[in-house]
């Protein structure tokens, strides 16, 4: 669109709203005038339709009076004729009255030529006799004179009770008279009155039109006759003139008579339409004059200078760098021309500089392409959109063909195509470097692993190409797979050997404790203490190694659930508050009401390891466990005021067997596996762990746990059964021990007897139940191995014994397994779960916790 055209369009946009407003005003005036015509038609209709109603009502009243006379009631023809002869002198000349019997034969009439004739076939006669009421008939012609008439009928009823019609009295109005009568009423200029019967036959038209009475209305009037209420409509009248008709349909006014008054629409709208045409002419003239003035001004002062500027621009683009504009019409255009000339001078200088730079760039690109082409490694160059531009000679030699964009994915192993395309698509969209391992097909058809790296090439911040290369890592890949498989095999072996390693360790720990009462003093006491200390260290090392091995082997599956964080913190408080206080440390656990989603057991292991480390490496001050909500996670932090971690060692504390400030490997300071387990559990659960520490000022280890996504509703606890009172006994409690390993069973029985328990030992649930049935006492504690013979589990044994007595008997599950099944069973039934090897101290703590709750303070002869 040219500048001149745009200017004219702008002028048009300025004038058009004004013109449109004027046109709208004229149109609105025309609409108002049209509404006035409709209102005028309604007013005329009200006046004339009332006249019609009065005329018909007068006929009805006259017929009713005649029907009630004695001459009519007796159907006496002579008396009736005498009555009508007298009445005929007083009724208008346009009206003919007849009286006929029920057979339709006229007995008397105001027209002396009619008596003796039959009118039984006339519809208004039949309608009056059948309906029994006043009837307005349709258009007829009188038989003896041929004059058009409008008939009315009223039945004559006998004076008896049933009022059966015995005759009919009728009246005929001369329609010629009616039309003359209506024409004598003053009507406005260009107005017309139309009266029809129920069939649409014209009864009268004013002003009178010869030959119109008795004709049928055109079909376009039919909706007006059948309408439900009075209204107005604009249509062509029967005289061919378009009129606005106000009408009374057949269902309103005088029944079976249609009355309409029409006003000549064009004549009524003539003045307003003429004004509208004059207004449109003036508006069009104003618009054209405005556009013409704008065109002449723009042509002289805008179009010509712009044409000069465009001509200079086109010449300059065509190669004529000497083209200039100079001074043109008007000060503004002259400044524009001079600015253009200055711009051209600058562009000319930049073009010369760019031509020199382009020549240098082309030389550089040719040199770079030569380097890539002759490089010994496989390389390629992609366009900015990632499509392939070319591959070098080494690539072509490896694949044995010319690789192009259409077949580049054919060089890859089919299993790698989808993965590579996904990585490339996201990296190219982000403009980021990307790398991946893939298998490329060699010219002999063999696939070998390669490491591919592709980097973006940018100039002045704009991506201009992608440069990539591939290195053969097939042998390294095979060696790495072999090493990883060896590591997995080792982890699977350690995980599988867990149970067998824990069982003998368990028996050694128990029998070592059983020896304590038998070694009174001397070197034996010291040797036994050192033996037990070594067994404690060996147990910690075995637990840590087996935990790491099962995590590395991938056999630990998180059991995610929603629970209150306070449940977990309460268990930490119960377990570690005594240890912290025994070391002289202040211990605090902040309240926390948040609901989290995690694995209750694995998260608990993470926090226990962090708390144990905090207690181990803190000599004074306090240990604080607190939680803080951050976005969609709950951050649980363990603060200590211990020795802290140097900044250069923070990342190393999560390595296996690494300890800060323990180069001598003093096992009393731990084994260096706790944080390694925390790191693995963090990855497994997707719970990020953060560390903040300063040497000499303490540390903060925090775990970010997802908050529950929905409202948490705790399960309703089952109603506790009232436990029966324990049987009378002295001071010894009864413990039931179930384990299918004879050595572990003997060790557990020995240590419990040493702690002054009566012990019922059994290698199966059935033998334990049989023994209790013979003994007859209620056990105080149940210590049951989880995995028993014949694929039975300890959970079953505890539940069976509880059924024999009551559900409040404490149960301890002991297991050497590393899976989650024992943990889930213990949580489901409310048992304590102890992992083998169980030290005497851990066993004593568990027994004291349960027996203290049942009998008050528990006294176990265990000293450490």
Image (spheres, helix red, strand yellow):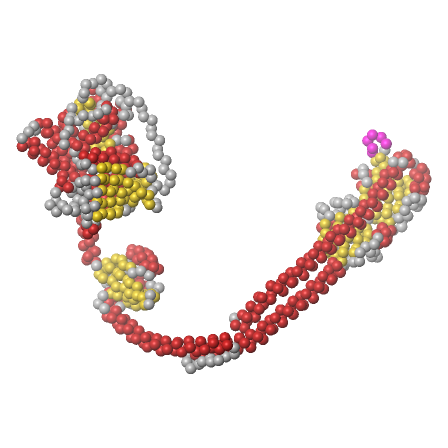
Would residue 698 be visible to someone looking at this image?
yes
514 lies left or right of 86: left
* The image quarter in which residue 704 lies: top left
Would residue 493 be visible to someone looking at this image?
no
| Residue 391 x %, y % | 28, 67
Residue closest to the eye, 401 or 766: 766
Q: How many marks?
A: 0
**Would residue 463 be counted in the magenta stretch?**
no
276 lies left or right of 655: right
| Residue 78 x %, y % | 94, 38
Q: Is the magenta stretch mostly helix, strand or loop?
A: loop
486 lies left or right of 134: left
Q: What residue range appears in magenta?
A: 159-164
* The image quarter in which residue 680 lies: top left
**668 above or below 387?**
above
71 lies left or right of 471: right
**83 above or below 284?**
above
* The image quarter in which residue 532 lies: top left
Residue name at image x 33 percent, y 45 percent = 630
């Amino acid at each position: 669109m040219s500048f001149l055209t745009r200017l004219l369009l702008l002028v048009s946009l300025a004038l058009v709203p004004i013109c449109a407003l004027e046109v709208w005003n004229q149109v609105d005036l025309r609409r108002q005038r049209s509404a006035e015509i409709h209102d005028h038609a309604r007013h005329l209709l009200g006046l004339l339709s009332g006249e019609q109603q009065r005329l018909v009502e007068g006929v009805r009243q006259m017929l009713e009076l005649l029907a009630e006379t004695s001459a009519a009631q007796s159907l006496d023809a002579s008396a009736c004729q005498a009555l009508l002869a007298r009445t005929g002198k007083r009724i208008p000349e346009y009206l003919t009255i007849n009286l006929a019997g029920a057979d339709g034969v006229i007995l008397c009439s105001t027209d002396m030529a009619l008596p003796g004739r039959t009118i039984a076939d006339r519809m208004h006669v039949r309608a009056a006799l059948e309906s029994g009421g006043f009837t307005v008939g349709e258009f007829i012609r009188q038989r003896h004179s041929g004059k058009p008439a409008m008939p009315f009928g009223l039945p004559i009823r006998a004076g008896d009770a049933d009022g059966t019609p015995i005759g009919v009295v009728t009246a005929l109005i001369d329609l010629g008279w009616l039309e003359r009568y209506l024409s004598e009423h003053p009507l406005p200029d260009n107005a017309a009155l139309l009266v029809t019967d129920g069939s649409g036959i014209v009864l009268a038209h004013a002003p009178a039109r010869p030959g119109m009475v008795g004709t049928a209305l055109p079909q376009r009037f039919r909706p007006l006759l059948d309408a439900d209420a009075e209204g107005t409509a604009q249509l062509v009248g029967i005289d061919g003139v378009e009129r606005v008709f106000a009408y009374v349909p057949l269902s309103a006014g005088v029944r079976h008579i249609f009355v309409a008054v029409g006003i000549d629409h064009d004549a009524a709208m003539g003045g307003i339409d003429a004004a509208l045409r004059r207004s449109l002419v003036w508006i069009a003239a104003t618009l054209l004059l405005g556009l013409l003035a704008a065109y002449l001004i723009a042509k002289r002062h805008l179009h010509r200078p712009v044409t000069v500027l465009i001509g200079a621009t086109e010449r300059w683009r065509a190669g004529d760098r000497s083209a200039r504009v100079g001074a043109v019409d008007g000060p503004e255009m002259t400044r524009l021309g001079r600015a253009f000339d200055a711009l051209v001078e600058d562009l000319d200088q930049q073009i010369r500089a760019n031509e020199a730079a382009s020549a240098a760039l082309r030389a550089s690109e040719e040199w770079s392409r030569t380097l890539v082409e002759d490089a010994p490694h496989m390389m390629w160059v992609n366009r900015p959109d990632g499509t392939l531009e070319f591959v070098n000679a080494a690539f072509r030699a490896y694949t044995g063909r010319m690789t192009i964009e259409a077949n580049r994915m054919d060089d890859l192993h089919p299993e790698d195509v989808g993965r590579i395309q996904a990585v490339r698509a996201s990296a190219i969209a982000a403009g980021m470097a990307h790398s991946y391992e893939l298998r490329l097909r060699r010219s002999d058809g063999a696939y070998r692993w390669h490491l591919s790296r592709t980097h973006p090439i940018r100039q002045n911040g704009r991506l201009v190409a992608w440069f990539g290369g591939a290195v053969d890592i097939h042998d390294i890949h095979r060696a790495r797979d072999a090493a990883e498989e060896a590591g997995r095999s080792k982890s699977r072996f350690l995980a599988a050997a867990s149970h067998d390693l824990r069982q003998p360790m368990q028996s050694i720990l128990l029998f070592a404790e059983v020896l304590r009462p038998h070694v009174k003093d001397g070197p034996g006491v010291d040797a036994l203490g050192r033996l037990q200390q070594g067994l404690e260290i060996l147990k910690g090392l075995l637990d840590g190694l087996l935990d790491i091995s099962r995590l590395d082997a991938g056999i630990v599956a998180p059991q995610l659930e929603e629970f209150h964080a306070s449940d977990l913190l309460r268990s930490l408080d119960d377990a570690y508050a005594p240890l912290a206080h025994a070391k002289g440390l202040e211990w605090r656990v902040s309240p926390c009401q948040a609901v989290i989603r995690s694995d209750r057991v694995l998260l608990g292991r993470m926090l226990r390891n962090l708390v144990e480390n905090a207690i181990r490496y803190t000599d004074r001050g306090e240990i604080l466990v607190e939680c803080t909500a951050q976005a969609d996670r709950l951050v649980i932090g363990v603060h200590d005021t211990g020795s802290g971690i140097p900044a250069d060692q923070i990342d190393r504390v999560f390595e296996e067997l690494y300890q800060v400030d323990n180069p001598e490997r003093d096992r009393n300071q731990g084994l260096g596996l706790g944080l390694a387990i925390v790191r693995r559990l963090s990855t497994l659960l997707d719970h990020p762990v953060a560390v903040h520490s300063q040497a000499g000022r303490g540390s903060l280890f925090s775990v970010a746990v997802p908050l529950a996504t929905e409202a948490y509703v705790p399960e309703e606890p089952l109603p506790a059964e009232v436990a029966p009172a324990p049987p009378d006994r002295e001071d010894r409690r009864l413990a039931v021990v179930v384990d299918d390993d004879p050595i572990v069973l003997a060790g557990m029985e020995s240590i419990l007897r040493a702690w002054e328990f009566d012990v019922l030992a059994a290698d199966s649930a059935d033998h334990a139940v049989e023994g209790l049935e013979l003994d007859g006492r209620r056990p105080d504690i149940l210590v049951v191995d989880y995995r028993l013979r014949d694929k039975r589990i300890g959970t079953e044994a505890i539940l069976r014994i509880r059924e024999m007595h009551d559900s409040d008997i404490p149960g301890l599950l002991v297991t050497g397994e590393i899976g989650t099944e024992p943990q889930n069973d213990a949580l489901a039934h409310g048992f304590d779960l102890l992992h083998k090897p169980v030290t005497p101290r851990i066993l004593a703590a568990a027994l004291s916790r349960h027996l203290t709750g049942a009998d008050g303070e528990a006294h176990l002869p265990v000293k450490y």
